[in-house]
Amino acid sequence: MKIAIEGMDGSGKTTIAKALAKRFNYRYIDRPFAFLFEEMGFNVEQIKAIEWKLWETEDEALISLLYSMGLLYGTRCIDDENIIYDRHYVSNYYWYGNEETTPLQQEIINLGGVPDLTILLHASIDVRISRIKSRDFKDPDLSNVAMYDYGYNKMISFLETNNFPFVVLETDSKTPDEVITEAISVILNKKEYKLKK
């Protein structure tokens, strides 16, 4: 089973994804782009240098292509494992999806397949900013204008357009443990549904 955990920065993706991977004993993959280069033997500093060079191009088609390579690798080259993805197609589309890159991203979905389930964690802008500040008030994400973007309309439109099985979990007034419990319930129901099919 392949499960993608998605949402805007500060929505709780990493906390929830790690907890779910541990609970179900699934492989945890954070940022498929980084995962691809890790598998190729690059260290963290080298991967960051590659990403910076990539961002410096300001070419969204090129950036989308390289991130898509990681997505494709994570879906086609390790297809025999159960995986929890911390960010996947939805994040790539949110950041780099536009008129030029959408055909490319569609082809990656055609080649890599749709996750069995996408869990979209929803949090308001104020809550997301508050969470990031409490984690690290110097976090560079706080200076990113996209941090103050609602973002969810674009994400949900992408999920619906591509017929992804997905659920939106509200996180504003819930503890991480409450969100994890709700996500576990969703996954168990999905697994039962798959067995019945």
Image: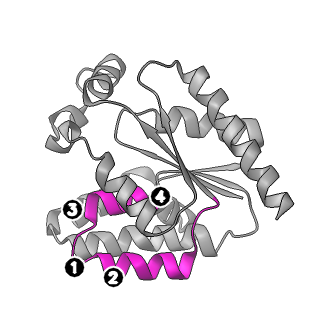
Whichever of callouts 4 and 3 sits on the residue coming sooner in the sequence is 3
Name the side, left or right, on which 96 lies relative to 32. left
Whichever of callouts 2 and 4 sits on the residue coming sooner in the sequence is 4
Which numbered disc, 4 or 3, marks the residue closer to the eye?
A: 4
**Tag on residue 100?**
1
Q: Dot 2: within a 10 Å radius of its alpha carbon, few (fewer than 14), some, or many (20 or more) residues? A: few
Q: Residue at x 74, y 35 (%)?
A: 23
Which segment did they paint magenta?
89-116
Q: Is residue 108 above or below residue 177?
A: below
**C-alpha separation, residue under disc 1 versus residue under disc 3:** 17 Å
Residue tagged 4? 88
Amino acid marked by disc 4? His
Which numbered disc, 3 or 2, marks the residue closer to the eye?
A: 2
Residues tagged 1 and 2 counted as in contact (Cβ below 8 A): yes
Q: Residue at x 46, y 32 (%)?
A: 12
**C-alpha separation, residue under disc 2 versus residue under disc 4:** 17 Å
Q: Dot 4: within a 10 Å radius of its alpha carbon, few (fewer than 14), some, or many (20 or more) residues? A: many
- Quadrant in the rendering for residue 140: top left
Majority secondary structure in the magenta region: helix
Image quarter hosting the C terminus: bottom right
Residues tagged 4 and 1 counted as in contact (Cβ below 8 A): no
Image quarter hosting the N terminus: bottom right
**C-alpha separation, residue under disc 4 versus residue under disc 3:** 18 Å
Q: Is residue 186 above or below residue 170?
A: below
**Tag on residue 55?**
3
Amino acid marked by disc 2? Pro
**C-alpha separation, residue under disc 1 versus residue under disc 2:** 7 Å
Which numbered disc, 2 or 4, marks the residue closer to the eye?
A: 2
Which numbered disc, 1 or 3, marks the residue closer to the eye?
A: 1
Residue tagged 2? 103
